[in-house]
Amino acid sequence: MEREGKKYEEHAYVIDYLPQGRLGSQKPAFRGEGVVQMIGGTYFTLLEAIPRKGETLQIGDIIYVGKKGRTQISHIIGRISYDELTSTAKDELPAVIEKMIKSQEPRFLKFFNESQPITPRMHSLELIPGIGKKLMWQVLNQREVRKFTNFDDLKERANIPDPVKLLARRILDELSKEEKYRLFTRPA
């Protein structure tokens, strides 16, 4: 039996920067060092890290968090849950997720073009908020005619109101709630 290797984020988006650290943290104190909260660009992993001395980060910055060659981050403290995010991070998260979805349009179009049923009665498309049986069948029928080429094509041919917002809502649900099925995120 082969074990799947660990998945690490290479890049992350800053969702909050606390130059004086985080008060009330359950994590060990780092002597007043700054703390940055981020969301990973591939697996939507929520992370907390210590920036390098003298580094000032802005919300929305994309930074390298891979194993080797970090220039802006001293070290990763670890993964955090949605409940451990600051209120600022929670407020910024929807806009940052939408930005991430737009920048990875081919990845999410692939989901609409290739998604499969989860059970005999439920299709993975139905897990997207706002997509019921009717819209699911429109997507399935239209992708048989030809694959979707961009979000505008998906909106036009399948009558999906705003695919980016619907996908962002699903990702937020996966991050903030206990979901039985995960389409885009890893469990915390």
Image (spheres, rainbow, N blue to C red):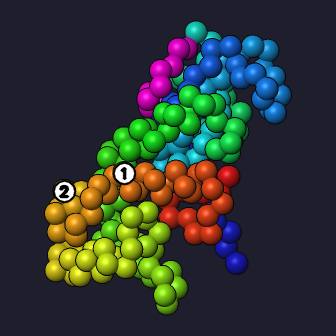
Task: Tell me: 72 left or right of 111.
Answer: right
Give the residue drawn at x 44%, y 27%: 61
Task: Tell me: 168 left or right of 57.
Answer: left
Instruction: Examine the image and state in which quarter residue 29 appears.
Output: top right
The furthest residue to the top: 54
* Residue 165 badge: 1
Q: Which residues are magenta?
A: 55-63
Look at the image and say whether residue 62 sits in the magenta stretch: yes
Task: Tell me: 22 left or right of 73.
Answer: right
Task: Tell me: 1 left or right of 132.
Answer: right
Give the residue drawn at x 48%, y 82%: 122
Residue marked by disc 2: 152
Q: Is residue 48 above or below residue 139?
A: above
Closer to us: 15 or 41: 15
Q: Position of residue 116 (x, y in %)?
A: 42, 79
* Residue type indicated by callout 1: Lys
Q: Is residue 187 above or below residue 143?
A: above
Give the residue drawn at x 36%, y 51%: 165
Q: Position of residue 30 (x, y in %)?
A: 78, 20
Q: Is residue 100 above or below residue 185?
A: above
Closer to us: 98 or 14: 98
